[in-house]
Image (tube, helix red, strand yellow):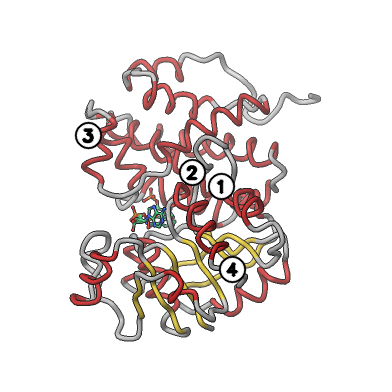
Amino acid sequence: MKIAVLGAGAWGTALAFAFCRQHHVTLWGRNAEQMIDMQATRLNRRYLPECPFPADLHLSADLSEAVLGVDLVLVVTPIAGLRPTLRELARLKVDAPLLWACKGFEAGSSLLPHQVVAEEFPHLKSVGVLSGPSFAREVAQGLPAAVTLASENYAFARDYARELHSPLLRIYANDDLVGVEVGGAVKNVMAIATGVADGLGFGMNARAALITRGLAEITRLAVALGGSQQSMMGLSGVGDLLLTCTGALSRNRQVGLKLAEGKSLDTILAELGHVAEGVPTAREVLKMAERLQVDMPITAAVCELLYHQATPQQVVERLLGRAPKPEFHAPGA
Ligand SMILES: NC(=O)C1=CN([C@@H]2O[C@H](COP(=O)(O)OP(=O)(O)OC[C@H]3O[C@@H](n4cnc5c(N)ncnc54)[C@H](O)[C@@H]3O)[C@@H](O)[C@H]2O)C=CC1
Ligand SMILES: O=C(CO)COP(=O)(O)O
């Protein structure tokens, strides 16, 4: 297949590496200067400095050139870049099948990525998300990983999962687009919370409790939005939640660790140099939870920390001080 990967950050670069083993791949980035540097050094020095480019990876800073005659477009910008990128694709009259790999709810609209795609490309039916436990650096180093390709059009998910699948990047098909997107979006919020708890030295018991109750929270929201509970047991549910809450490579977890050190959000984001989707997404998830009357206390606590100047200690006291309740639901309820 001829594939255009749009977005030359860590994850776009890593996916381009993975797919160019079997396909003709062009990695497009919006920053022409950076793309010239990448071509000259065959390295993404800004976002993935330790991984040299495979010889057969093509690069372009010209979107029209990158998408010319492609069989698949894969958008790997942060969620904030999804809509602007789709609008550029619409302007260029691109109608190739479309996948995206961004994780989050769109800031302001609180829409999931597939809803943004439906607004910008209402007639395109071959669309879906690629999501799951996958740190860019490990994928770029050729270490094995498994992800989910979810689409409401299951035949599309099945066929493109088969096309993109390889021994090092195993791809599973799923028809639960909502569940897979909610899992990928909200685990980032839970990773911030887990980073805070770990940074405060609360120990491994507390970490396991947070991850488990985080999963309960994600599941409630996913089901309220029409997703399937089963996906929460899958790669884009518990799989990505575990990875991001415990893995040192997670940027969202790093945000939490630095919040626990008492650093301001602005300082943390400047130090990070990468996107941390859990930061804008936490606010949208809380809005959505309030609208749907879904109980999401960990998300609310993360929002208190990020946006209401609460200290980590205050937030933890409030979370631990809540009244006891049934783990699942009261018998007979
Ligand atoms: N890094 C990882 O391990 C993984 C990241 N993701 C998701 O992939 C998405 C991208 O993440 P990363 O590549 O890691 O971020 P990053 O922070 O490494 O790079 C972001 C890239 O997006 C570009 N960008 C930002 N706005 C854009 C726009 N409007 N148009 C075009 N390009 C734009 C930036 O120039 C930069 O190249 C996020 O939603 C993230 O949650 C998903 C799985 C793994
Ligand atoms: O989504 C990811 C792994 O699946 C990457 O997580 P971070 O954005 O927290 O680094």
Q: Is 14 on the left or on the right of 227, as rendered?
A: left
Which image quarter is the N terminus in?
bottom right
Q: Which residue is mark 1?
A: 183
Which image quarter is the C terminus in?
top right
User: Can residue 242 be seen in the rendering of this structure?
Assistant: yes
State the CA–CA distance, disc 4 to disc 3: 40 Å
Amino acid type, label 2: Lys
Secondary structure under the numbered disc 1 in the rendered image: helix
Q: Is 188 on the left or on the right of 42, as rendered?
A: right
Q: Quadrant of residue 91?
A: bottom right
Q: Which residue is mark 4?
A: 93
Up the image or down, 110 lies above or below 174; here it is: above
Amino acid type, label 1: Gly
State the CA–CA distance, disc 2 to disc 4: 34 Å
- The answer to whether the residues at label 1 and label 2 have Cβ atoms under 8 Å apart is yes
Q: Which residue is mark 2?
A: 187
Q: Which residue is mark 3?
A: 267
Secondary structure under the numbered disc 3 in the rendered image: helix
